[in-house]
Amino acid sequence: MSDVDYSIVIPVYYNEGCLVPLMESLERTVLQTNPNYVAEIIFVDDGSGDGSFAELQLIQNRWPGLVTIITNT
């Protein structure tokens, strides 16, 4: 694993439907504007009962190596 310059930690609780747009926004406004830094994005699912976890898995598949999912159930 490479050294990480910064981490973004995002709590998730019943956020289905807004997680992909959030990640796309982070990619445009943070990741692409700071190409000289290595980032990691950590989503912490606090036991959502909706489809948030499935959406997080889609995000992790789309951005492999960048996204980590932690579940607190």
Image (spheres, rainbow, N blue to C red):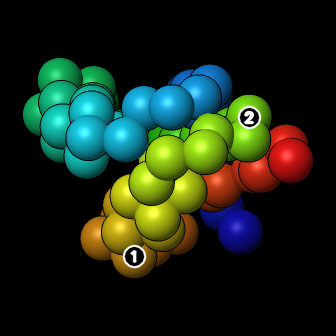
* Residue, disc 1: 61
The label on residue 47 is none
Horizontal side of 57 relative to 3 (left or right) equals left
Q: Identify the residue at image location x=39%, y=76%.
A: 61
Q: Amino acid at mark 1?
A: Asn
Res 8 → quadrant: top right
* Residue, disc 2: 46
SS label for mark 1 = helix
Give the answer, above or below, for where 17 lies relative to 59. above
Q: Nearer the viewer, residue 71 or 49?
A: 49
| Residue 35 image position (x, y, % from top left) | 27, 40
Give the answer, above or below, for where 58 lies relative to 41. below
SS label for mark 2 = loop
| Residue 49 image position (x, y, % from top left) | 61, 45
Please state, as top left, top right, bottom left or bottom right, where the N terminus lies in the image.
bottom right
Q: Amino acid at mark 2?
A: Asp
Give the answer, above or below, for where 67 lies relative to 5. below
Residue 60 shows in the view: no
In the image, farthest residue toward the right: 73
Q: Identify the residue at image location x=54%, y=56%.
A: 53
Quote the CA–CA distance across marks 2 and 1. Answer: 20 Å
Res 68 → quadrant: bottom right
